[in-house]
Image (cartoon, rainbow, N blue to C red):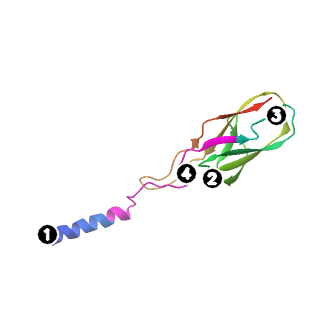
Amino acid sequence: MKTTNTILLGILIVITLACGYSSKNTTAGTSMPAIANLSPGSTNAGDPAFMLTVNGSNFASNAVVNWNSAAQATTFVNGAQVTIAVPAAAVSNAGTIKISVTNPAVSGSGMYGGSPAQTSSTVNFVIN
């Protein structure tokens, strides 16, 4: 009887592990992105087009920079830096632009697979 119980316990453990019951999936994009600073930190109304560099942490390779909540074509440099090209028309008038970074949702399977999209807090970009 003891041998049978031991064998059944072993089979149960093997089946549980084979079904993917393990630690949570930790693929890129599951962490909340955070913005440390912008470079440049501001510009003047009427200035020419420029590259805006967003420095921070936890940027996924498919992260997107949002300019006043509108997603922009984004270049991934590394997990701590992304850039966007800002056209002159976007800085033609004085104002404050809200910049954020979104790591898109990650699909997954199994009990703990995937994660929702995560967006950083906003940082102000000032157009003088």
Disc 3 to disc 4, C-alpha distance? 33 Å
Principal SS element in the magenta part?
loop
> Percent from the top left, x then y, of residue 72?
72, 43
The region drawn magenta spans: 15-37
Q: Which mark is residue 87?
A: none
Which residue appears at 64% of the width and 52% of the height? 62
Q: State the SS at label 2.
A: loop
Front disc: 1 or 2: 2
Q: Secondary structure at mark 4?
A: loop
23 in magenta: yes
Classed neighbour count for the residue bearing mark 4: other residues with Cα under 10 Å, few (<14), some (14–19), many (≥20): some
Query: Element type at marker 3?
Result: helix
Judge whether 78 appears above or below 42 on screen.
below
Figure quadrant of the C terminus: top right
Say which of marks 2 and 3 sits in front.
Answer: 2
x 32%, y 65%: residue: 15
Identify the residue under disc 1: 2
Residue neighbourhood size for the residue with mark 2, other residues' Cα within 10 Å, grouped as few (<14), some (14–19), many (≥20): some
Is residue 34 rendered magenta in the image? yes
Residue 105 x/y as whole percent:
56, 47
Question: Can you tell which of label 4 and label 2 is closer to the viewer?
Answer: 2
Marks 2 and 3 in Cβ contact (< 8 Å): no
Q: Are marks 3 and 4 in contact (CB under 8 Å)?
A: no
The label shown at residue 79 is 2
Which residue ends up furthest to the bottom in the rendered image? 3
Q: What is the three-letter code of the residue carrying label 1? A: Lys
Residue 44 image offset from top left, x and y in percent: 83, 32
Mark 3 sits on what residue?
91
**Identity of the amino acid at label 4?**
Val
Q: In 3D space, how far apart are the residues under numbered discs 2 and 3 (Cα atoms)?
A: 27 Å
